[in-house]
């Protein structure tokens, strides 16, 4: 599947990939991780999260694991993990965001420089 | 139940319900995950408070709803579903989606209407759900013990009130026989709650405790977490000082549970060794924290000493009826064997639940019924609003019919709209219910049982869901039915303003108004009766003066105070309290009025032959120190009051009340005669007493109970029972504080128990009726307001529909009063019918309230006469506004309107 066809990601998709790229997580774990990362509520609710997860599984960005034998994890839960394609898409999206950041920084410093 | 356990369950309920909106594939795939996450998140959000939780729940619930549509769309367009099934499903789902979308749009178009309707329904559903949660917590939910439906209590009663569900007491000796000879009863134990004094490092603390017999924990199927139950040996009279403590109590006061066994605590000045620890949460009877063995003195307190509460577990195949039959046989045998104590005595048995809930049961059902009527009125209002609005939608319905929509289809669509309204109303109602349940709990007097078990739980939420369903049918079906049967040519021709549904719809509107008014009459009559009853209750003369009297109770341990020393101690305490500035008077009393420490007893006249056992005069027993009669302003009608010269050594005397004199000394002058006084606690007095006076009657047990016969004994000659100290003075709080100080300096191990005022005890008697009245009054006001608003809406609509007719009439010479009358009549006619029906219904249903009323007949004429004009006045006001508007219509405008 063409990586570019997924770019740009929706913000909920980016949040999911960031969370499940690190390690497999269950749904609420993803939400909590996103919350921790941002320091506030991620802005999507549980139903939206699951619709996105299912969509991303159908398009091959994530896969679901029925169980996981982690020590502190709830073994009965469904865990979600990024696929190789998902990792590629995440990298591509981050690259795109980096481009925006670089461009933005350049512009802002120009404006700041001009007004100083 | 706390909010921490309710929250996740509520969240799960919401998730599970709303997931039904999703395609099956979604639910099978991640349904349980979503539910699980809802629970986790709910628990997290509850940590930050109920508000945060509610906001979170609302957001996620709406997210579930709003995601359902897109999910259906995706699932239908994605490949993989079998073609035929898919098409069929598209048909059904499309219809629902169309209807839903249509309903959402049509409600959005009229935000005012939607808000009014949702608010009205929310009010009804919220109030009903809140009341239901109270009824469920108190009446419906089983007691919090394993297999609690098998728990019963057994007590001694007379054959006449063997089936009264009040509960009562048992003597220790009879308890042993019940234990040994009732196969239906698997296990039974005695438990009496009382205040224990626990001393520690010089300070004394009053702790709720209980004296129990071995086996109590087994009866409740609640094993101890550490140690063991009491043994029979420990339960013997003068047995070892041992105790069982509650886990929570030990942890709070002393430290780690592991250290409890083998330690000892000082109870009543004596070290008690701890042999067991009860699990946290177990607190029978009544908040008990510490349990000690009953150690009954069989010699001193024998079979006639009826002073123990019992709790028993029925055998698995037994019922209350089989137990009752066995107990009756046993009672007959014991009566023959021990006539002096067991004459006229049988055993009653009732479920522990019924006895715990007691007399609040009818009141709560009545209140639930009342709030149900408020809900009915709310439904009626909404139905009317929809009918009224439906008229303006006739054209739309007709157009749709022309375009091929069948009656069923339109009916379904209208009902979908109603269901959506009901759902929104239900959500609003849930929020209101949370607030209202809190309000009810904060208003409720403490003497209503099991209040701590009231809370929102899945059953209550399910009940709210059921209400939504029922209300949808109630307010949605009739309008939907009427509107879907529109005669389409007429509707199209008249442009929505015609008479297409006039006959049927107008009749339904009138019928609905009549119902609303009738229900309001019922509620107003109920509230009116409660007001009258409460007024009568506050007028009761208790027979004593409760003003400015502070009161507290003492427990002088038998181990340290002999009867003599008690009297001396109380004298010394009274003396010191009398010297406190602000104290006008001090008196000692055992069994002060309304203190729930009444001692039931009796007496026999020495000048008459001894009556048969159990047949002699019955009289309450109270012991009064010098000055008590004067302080309470109990009049002495004959003879004299007690004096300081009435001491332990002097002549044994007694004062009886007027009731006792009239009932048991018919035609004789009681003063100077001698009686034997018996105290039910089994300690029969030794010698006879001479009656030295007759006092006025007092209502000593219950304010609403007619005065009973009483015997008053000088405290110096009694010396038994819990002495209370009464202090007269302006500032009760300061008096009690001073008393605490004096008591500490006399004996630091004695705590001051149940400090308060006599006026508070009187007031507590009014707390329950006042609470019921408050709720009924709230419901009645809601009903009247809703009915008034409904009346206004319908009449105002009728005026707007009849503008042209009114214009024509005025053009033809009708005068303003005639027009006003015409309009008023629109509301007043159905109101009159409603009032008539309501009064008849109130007359018929009043009997349901009999148990709640004091000296007011359920068919109280004054109330029945007062309510109709009041309601009629409200109806007239509600109709007057549209009537005025009608009268101001200029005929020309009215005609041009066409």
Image (spheres, rainbow, N blue to C red):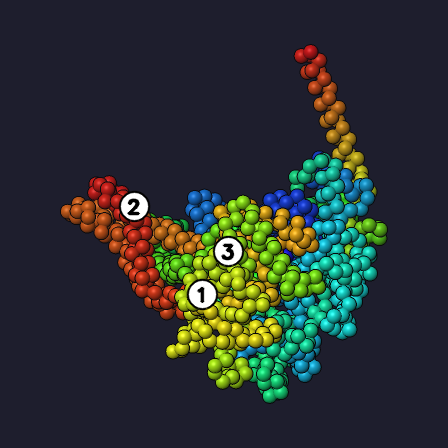
**Of residues B268 and A84, the one drawn nearer to the viewer in this rendering:** B268
Q: Nearer the viewer, mark 2 or mark 3?
A: 3
Residue drawn at (55%, 59%), measured in percent from left and top? Answer: B588
From the viewer's perspective, tell me whether residue B613 is left or right of residue B811.
right
Q: Which residue is mark 2?
A: B881
From the viewer's perspective, tell me whether residue B307 is left or right of residue B822.
right
From the viewer's perspective, tell me whether residue A103 is left or right of residue B59.
right
In the rendered image, the vertical position of residue B66 relative to residue B676, given as above or below: above
At which x and y percent is residue B337? 62, 87
| Sequence-wise first label, 2 or 3 | 3
Q: Are marks 3 and 1 in contact (CB under 8 Å)?
A: no
Q: Can marks 2 and 3 be said to lie on one chain?
A: yes
Which quadrant of the structure image shows residue B135? bottom right
Q: Which residue is mark 3?
A: B758
At which x and y percent is residue B223? 75, 66
Q: Secondary structure at mark 2?
A: helix
Alpha-carbon neighbours of circle 3 within 10 Å: few (<14), some, or many (≥20)?
many
At which x and y percent is residue B67? 61, 47
So how many labels did they put on this image? 3
Residue drawn at (70%, 81%), measured in percent from left and top? Answer: B180
**Of residues B110 and B570, the one drawn nearer to the viewer in this rendering:** B570
Q: Nearer the viewer, mark 3 or mark 1?
A: 1
The quarter of the picture where the C terminus of chain B appears is: top left
- The answer for which chain carries disc 2 is B
Q: Residue furthest left?
A: B813
What number is the disc on residue B640? 1
Q: CA distance from mark 2 to mark 3?
A: 52 Å
**Of residues B653 and B733, the one drawn nearer to the viewer in this rendering:** B653
Alpha-carbon neighbours of circle 2 within 10 Å: few (<14), some, or many (≥20)?
some
Q: Are marks 2 and 1 in contact (CB under 8 Å)?
A: no
Alpha-carbon neighbours of circle 1 within 10 Å: few (<14), some, or many (≥20)?
some
């Amino acid at each position: 599947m063409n990586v570019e066809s997924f770019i740009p990601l929706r913000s909920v998709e980016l949040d999911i990939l960031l969370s499940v790229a690190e390690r497999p997580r269950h749904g609420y774990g993803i939400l909590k991780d996103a919350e921790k990362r941002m320091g506030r509520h991620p802005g999507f609710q549980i139903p939206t999260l699951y619709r996105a997860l299912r969509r991303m599984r159908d398009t091959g960005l994530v896969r679901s694991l029925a169980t996981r034998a982690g020590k502190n994890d709830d073994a009965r839960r469904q865990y979600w993990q990024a696929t190789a394609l998902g990792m590629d898409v995440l990298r591509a999206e981050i690259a795109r965001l980096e481009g925006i950041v670089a461009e933005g920084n350049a512009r802002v410093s120009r404006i700041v420089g001009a007004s100083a | 139940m706390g909010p921490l356990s309710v929250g996740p369950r509520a969240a799960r309920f919401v998730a599970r319900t709303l997931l039904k909106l999703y395609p099956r594939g979604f639910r099978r795939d991640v349904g349980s995950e979503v539910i699980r996450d809802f629970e986790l998140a709910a628990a997290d959000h509850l940590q930050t408070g109920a508000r945060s939780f509610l906001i979170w729940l609302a957001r996620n619930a709406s997210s579930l709803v709003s995601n359902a549509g897109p999910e259906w769309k995706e699932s239908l367009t994605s490949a993989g579903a079998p073609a035929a099934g898919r098409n069929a499903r598209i048909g059904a789902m499309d219809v629902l989606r169309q209807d839903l979308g249509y309903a959402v749009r049509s409600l959005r178009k009229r935000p005012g209407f939607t808000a009014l309707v949702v608010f009205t329904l929310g009010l009804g559903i919220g109030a009903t759900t809140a009341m239901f949660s109270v009824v469920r917590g108190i009446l419906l939910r089983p007691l919090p013990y394993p297999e609690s439906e098998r728990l019963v209590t057994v007590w001694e009663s007379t054959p006449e009130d063997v089936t009264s569900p009040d509960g009562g007491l048992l003597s220790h000796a009879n308890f042993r026989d019940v234990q040994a000879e009732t196969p239906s009863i698997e296990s039974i134990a005695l438990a009496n709650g009382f205040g224990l004094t626990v001393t520690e490092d010089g300070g004394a603390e009053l702790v709720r405790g209980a004296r129990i017999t071995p086996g109590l924990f087994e009866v409740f199927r609640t094993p101890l977490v550490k140690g063991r139950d009491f043994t029979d040996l420990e339960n013997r009279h003068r047995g070892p000082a041992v105790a069982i403590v509650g886990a929570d109590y030990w942890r709070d006061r002393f430290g780690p549970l592991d250290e409890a066994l083998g330690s000892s605590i000082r109870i009543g000045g004596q070290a008690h060794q701890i042999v067991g620890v009860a699990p946290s949460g177990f607190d029978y009877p009544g908040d008990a924290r510490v349990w000690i063995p009953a150690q009954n003195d069989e010699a001193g307190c024998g079979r006639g000493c009826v002073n123990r509460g019992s709790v028993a577990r029925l055998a698995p195949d037994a019922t209350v009826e089989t137990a009752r039959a066995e107990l009756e046989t046993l009672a007959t045998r014991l009566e023959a064997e021990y006539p002096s104590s067991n004459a006229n005595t049988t055993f009653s048995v009732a479920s522990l639940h019924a006895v715990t809930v007691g007399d609040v049961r009818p009141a709560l059902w009545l209140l639930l019924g009342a709030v149900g009527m408020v809900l009915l009125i709310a439904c009626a209002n909404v139905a009317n609003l929809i009918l009224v609005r439906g008229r303006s939608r006739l054209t739309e319905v007709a157009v749709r019919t022309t375009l091929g929509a069948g009656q069923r289809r339109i009916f379904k669509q209208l009902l979908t709209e109603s269901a959506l309204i009901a759902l929104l109303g239900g959500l609003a109602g849930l929020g209101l219910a949370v607030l209202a349940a809190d309000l009810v709990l904060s208003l409720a007097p403490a003497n209503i049982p099991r209040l701590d078990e009231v809370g929102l739980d899945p059953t209550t939420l399910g009940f709210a869901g059921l209400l939504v369903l029922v209300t949808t049918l109630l307010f949605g079906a009739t309008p939907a039915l009427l509107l879907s049967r529109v005669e389409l040519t007429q509707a199209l021709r008249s442009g929505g303003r015609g008479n297409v549904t006039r006959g049927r719809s107008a009749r339904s509107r009138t019928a609905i108004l009549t119902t609303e008014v009738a229900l309001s009459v019922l509620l107003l009559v109920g509230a009116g009766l409660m007001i009258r009853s409460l007024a009568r209750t506050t007028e009761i003369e208790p027979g004593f003066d409760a003003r400015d009297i502070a009161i507290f109770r003492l427990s002088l341990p038998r181990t340290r105070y002999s009867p003599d020393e008690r009297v001396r101690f109380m004298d010394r305490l009274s003396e010191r309290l009398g010297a406190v500035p602000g104290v006008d008077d001090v008196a000692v009393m055992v069994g002060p009025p309304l203190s729930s420490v009444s001692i039931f007893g009796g007496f026999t006249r020495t000048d008459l032959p001894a009556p048969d056992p159990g047949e002699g005069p019955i009289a309450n027993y109270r012991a009064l120190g010098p000055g008590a009669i004067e302080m309470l302003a109990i009049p002495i009608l004959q003879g004299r009051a007690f004096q300081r010269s009435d001491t332990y050594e002097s002549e044994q005397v007694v004062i009886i009340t007027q009731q006792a004199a009239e009932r048991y000394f018919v035609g004789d002058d009681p003063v100077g005669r001698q009686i034997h006084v018996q105290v039910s606690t089994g300690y029969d007095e030794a010698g006879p007493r001479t009656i030295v006076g007759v006092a006025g009657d007092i209502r000593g047990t219950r304010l609403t109970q007619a005065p009973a016969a009483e015997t008053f004994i000088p405290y110096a000659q009694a010396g038994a029972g819990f002495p209370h100290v009464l202090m007269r003075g302006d500032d009760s709080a300061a008096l009690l504080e001073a008393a605490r100080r004096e008591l500490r300096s006399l004996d630091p191990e004695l705590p001051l128990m149940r400090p308060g005022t006599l006026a508070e005890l009187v007031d507590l008697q009014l707390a329950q009726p006042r609470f019921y009245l408050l709720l009924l009054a709230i419901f009645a006001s809601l009903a009247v307001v809703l009915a008034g608003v409904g009346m206004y809406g319908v009449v105002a609509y009728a005026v707007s529909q009849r503008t042209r007719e009114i214009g024509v009439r005025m053009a033809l010479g009708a005068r303003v009063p005639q027009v006003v009358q015409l309009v008023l009549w629109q509301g007043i006619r159905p109101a009159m019918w409603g009032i008539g029906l309501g009064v008849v219904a109130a007359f018929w249903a009043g009997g349901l309230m009999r148990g709640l009323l004091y000296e007011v007949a359920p068919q109280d004429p004054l109330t029945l006469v007062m309510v109709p004009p009041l309601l009629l006045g409200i109806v007239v006001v509600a109709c007057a506004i549209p009537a005025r508007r009608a009268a101001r219509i200029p005929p020309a405008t009215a005609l041009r309107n066409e």
